[in-house]
Amino acid sequence: MSGDLHSGDGDDRTSVAHAGPEHADAPEFAREMWKTRLGFVLAAVGSAVGLGNMWRFSYLTAENGGAAFVMLYVLMTAVVGIPVMLAEFTLGRGTRRSSIGALRKAGGRRWAPLGYVFVTAGILILSFYSVIAGWVTRYALAGIFTGFPADTGAYFDQISSGTPAMGFHLFFMAVTIAIVMGGVEKGIERASFIMMPALFLIIAGLAVWAATLAGSGEGYSFYLAPSFDELTNPRTLAAATSQAFFSLSLGMGAMLTFSSYLSRQESLPREAGLISFSDFGVAFVSGLVVFPVIFALGLQGAVGESTVGALFISLPGAFNAMGAIGRLVGILFFVALFIGAVTSAISLLEVVVSALIDEWRIPRKTAAVGAGAFIATLGLWPAADINALGALDAVTNYIFLPVGGLALAIFVGWLYKNSLDEVSRGVGEGFRPWLKGWLWLLRIVVPVLLVAVLFSGMGATRDALSTLFGG
Ligand code: PHE
């Protein structure tokens, strides 16, 4: 293996990494970098916080018994999420390459295909993520211009597939492409700086408002009082692990790519902790909005029924029933969701764009437009057919991400010689012994749990594929 990186290749923003002769296939050039540490953190939190925190988190919580799921989710964020995020950071910052180049540089040619798997996952996820984000855009605009419809079920059927869904999907992709074209600092960092604080404020404000609703108590108790038998249910464990993965944007090189633009002075464990905590915080506080609203209006029956039930049917229905204040709250809610979706989508596109830049020297603007147009075209399929959306969701969540995470954990845990060195940079003496524990989590615990996700997801993936192709 050729994982011998040079430790001293400088921290200044214009520095050029020096590759040894064994990397002659990857000529060096000046790469972009984050302007500030906070910019990196906000962009990574932006990637993490998205539809996963509000859409997937609420329906998985409803489906898996409420608070017990939340507890397992916290545990899996700590035991699987943070270790894999650190593995991605170690590779990204250690090599200063996006996924394909990072794996080739760190692991030799045999590992480069994993980078292609990551890029493929990014393309597939964005193709359907953008369709859901298109629905979100539609709801936000409906709230602003006409108010939320009374019959949200019928409304959702109408807008969720076909021409209306395609139009909003294409609009959302155009926004994503425009930001990524701007570059790491002027596009992604700047957008995250403006959008993320706005999102935090909106969600926190809505949670305070939800506390004033009559009947919110039942929502809180469903959400916060655990039913302990769910804790030992292996399906709940697998669901919590896969949710931690999706929500933290892991297993497909997004965090790897973002960290490749990060300076060597920053402590990776500190950033991983901060990002994971913020991501959990937003999911948790979103639950403090969603559940009280739904229970206060007696809509809990519909939530766990379908993956789209809570967010696109029950909640807007509740906003409609609440009159003027409901309309205002609903608009804010969907605007926050839109922000979350945009900042996640840019990280998905950046995985592809960054690889095109690093590997083939394609100029950023061309890469962003080209990759974006390709993904937008692919996304017309899930926009036309909601079963295709379900199948893409299942295949990426239950196969691509766990397989990607498993391979990463094995590579960084067992094979990559630089992992401990790289992860210790900028870390205080007192904390260093803990990093050995990180390595063992990656080596043993993470693989076991991800294999569990693969097994438990097989049924759901088969169902989703047979609905698409067979039914
Ligand atoms: N983490 C994002 C969310 O919660 C989704 C995502 C997955 C983004 C993978 C990038 C990579 O919505």
Image: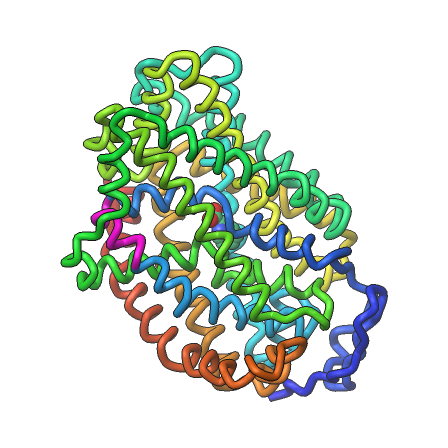
Magenta stretch prevailing secondary structure:
helix
Image-quadrant location for residue 173:
top right
Is residue 143 shown above or below 197? above
Q: Residue at x 25, y 61 (%)?
A: 456
Give percent across and percent down for residue 183: 75, 49
Q: Is residue 404 left or right of residue 243?
A: right
Front-most of residues 373 and 394: 394
Front-most of residues 38 and 192: 38
Q: Residue at x 52, y 79 (%)?
A: 412
Q: Which residues are magenta?
A: 63-71
Q: Considering the image in quadrants, where does the C terminus appear? A: top left
One can see residue 468 in this view: yes
Image-quadrant location for residue 51:
top left
Is residue 448 shown above or below 227? below
One can see residue 101 in this view: no
- Indicate the colouring scheme: rainbow
Quick check: is 398 in the magenta stretch? no
Q: Is residue 367 left or right of residue 219?
A: right
Quick check: is 65 in the magenta stretch? yes
Number of marks: 0
Give percent across and percent down for residue 54: 41, 41
Q: Considering the image in quadrants, where does the N terminus appear? A: bottom right
Q: Residue at x 77, y 46 (%)?
A: 186
Front-most of residues 88 and 193: 193
For the view shown, which residue lies furthest in the left direction? 229
Is residue 211 shown above or below 445? above
Give percent across and percent down for residue 24: 77, 80
Give percent across and percent down for residue 177: 66, 41
Q: Residue at x 33, y 21 (%)?
A: 317
